[in-house]
């Protein structure tokens, strides 16, 4: 009987690990959808040039880096608390995503006539909050994974791989299929739906498992 329970427990843990990676895959997919939509929106507002490209890339890289630092500070506590923080962050990203196009257009209208440096700064500030939230998800989820399953190396490598894979597939799909088929607004809705799905799965499945 003990062996049977042990095998069932191992199978459950394996399914949970796979589901956790799937959740982070969707999170990475949504993040790149946002990046590409925001990039195209900013191009329409401030023009297509090397400065605009640099601005968008800088905002994402800076936001992800700062978010990782913030996520590191949030990655303490029991598994249930970590799940809740992760879900809240994903919900926040989704809500920002739904509001993002209107916000960026407002920023674009407000910065008309301002200097390029001021426009760049205001745009950077507008994009930093969601990218910081995206950067915070990895350390929080890694901390949860380690507390649940152990194996720090597997946690970091596996989650980072699936998140990056989701981002890569999103870049391909958005460039060739999604944006053409749905347009910018509905592509953002798709990304937000992904965030809300991730948050819901985290709360329903993993908060029940956490102790």
Image (tube, rainbow, N blue to C red):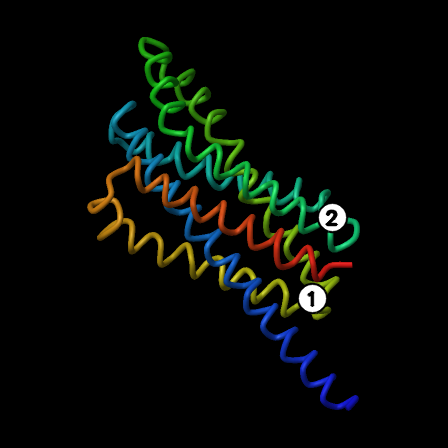
Q: In which quarter of the image is residue 5?
A: bottom right
Q: How crowded is mark 2: few (under 14 residues within 10 Å), some or many (20 or more)?
A: some
Task: For the C terminus, give its image quadrant.
Answer: bottom right
Question: In the figure, 94 relative to 113: above or below?
Answer: below
Q: Which of pointers 2 and 1 lies earlier in the amino acid sequence?
A: 2
Residue 207 falls in image quadrant: bottom right
- Residue 41 percent coordinates (x, y): 30, 30
Q: Label 2's element?
A: helix
Q: Position of residue 95 (x, y in %)?
A: 49, 34
What residue does disc 1 label? 152
Residue at screen point 29% across, 49% down: 174
Q: Name the residue under label 2.
A: 81
Displayed quadrant of residue 209:
bottom right
Number of dots carrying numbers: 2
- Callout 1: 10 Å neighbours few (<14), some, many (20+)? some
Residue occupying image coordinates x 73% and y 52%: 80
Which percent across, then down, holds residue 47?
Answer: 25, 26
Image quarter (top left, top right, bottom left or bottom right) of the N terminus = bottom right
């Amino acid at each position: 009987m003990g062996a049977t329970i042990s095998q069932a427990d191992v199978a459950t843990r394996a399914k949970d690990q796979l589901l956790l990676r799937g959740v982070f895959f969707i999170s990475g997919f949504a993040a790149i959808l946002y990046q590409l939509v925001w990039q195209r929106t900013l191009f329409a507002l401030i023009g297509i040039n090397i400065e605009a490209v640099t601005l968008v890339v800088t905002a994402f890289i800076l936001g992800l880096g700062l978010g990782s630092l913030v996520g590191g500070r949030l990655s303490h506590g029991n598994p249930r608390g970590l799940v809740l923080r992760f879900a809240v962050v994903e919900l926040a990203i989704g809500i920002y995503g739904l509001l993002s196009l209107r916000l960026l257009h407002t920023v674009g209208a407000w910065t008309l006539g301002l200097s390029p440096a001021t426009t760049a700064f205001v745009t950077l500030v507008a994009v930093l909050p969601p990218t910081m939230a995206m950067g915070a998800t990895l350390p929080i989820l890694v901390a949860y994974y380690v507390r649940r399953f152990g194996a720090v190396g597997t946690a970091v490598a596996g989650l980072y791989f699936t998140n990056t894979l989701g981002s890569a597939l999103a870049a391909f799909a958005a460039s060739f299929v999604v944006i053409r088929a749905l347009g910018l607004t509905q592509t953002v809705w798709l990304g937000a739906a992904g965030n809300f799905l991730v948050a819901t799965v985290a709360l329903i499945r993993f908060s029940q498992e956490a102790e």
